[in-house]
Image (cartoon, helix red, strand yellow):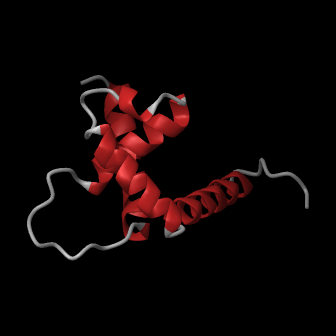
Amino acid sequence: MGKKCRTQAVERDLEWEIIEPLLPKKKQTRPPKWSKRQILDGILYQLKNGCNWCDLPKDLPPYSTVFWYYKQWREQGVIENLRDILHRRVREQVKKKGNGQPS
């Protein structure tokens, strides 16, 4: 694995540490077939690429599963909350680097 791939994997792990606690907890009756991270990867893929849900790549969970979670999380305000928190963190990082716009 090249240095770039390792760096991206570490960045993704750090992002996941921020995101995971923001996702709803579900009473587990049995182990899930797909992790929340895999579900979120599917949602983010669709939002980034604008593809139809049924055109998600085969290495992601089935589109029906991803779309079901997307609808649930959207209705619960989870998607909006994730967006707001991540935007806030990016703005804070930009300010720390001294690249922020004057208020």
For the point 59% across and 61% down, the residue is 80
Quadrant assignment for the N terminus? top left
Indicate the quadrant where residue 48 lies.
top right
Tell whether 62 sits left or right of 56.
Answer: left
Q: Residue furthest top?
A: 2
For the point 43% across and 44% down, the residue is 43
Could you say where residue 24 lies in the image, as x and y percent from the top left? 37, 71
Could you say where residue 101 lies in the image, as x and y percent from the top left? 86, 51
Question: In front: 6, or 65?
Answer: 65
The answer to whether residue 42 is seen in the rendering is: yes
Could you say where residue 66 lies in the image, as x and y percent from the top left? 34, 46
Q: Is residue 29 above or below residue 57?
A: below
Q: Is residue 24 above or below residue 9?
A: below
Indicate the quadrant where residue 77 lies.
bottom right
The answer to whether residue 14 is seen in the rendering is: no
For the point 45% across and 56% down, the residue is 71
For the point 29% across and 56% down, the residue is 36
Q: Residue furthest right?
A: 103
Question: In front: 56, or 96?
Answer: 56
Question: In front: 26, or 14?
Answer: 26
Quadrant assignment for the C terminus? bottom right
Tell whether 67 sits left or right of 26.
Answer: right
Could you say where residue 45 lies in the image, as x and y percent from the top left? 44, 35
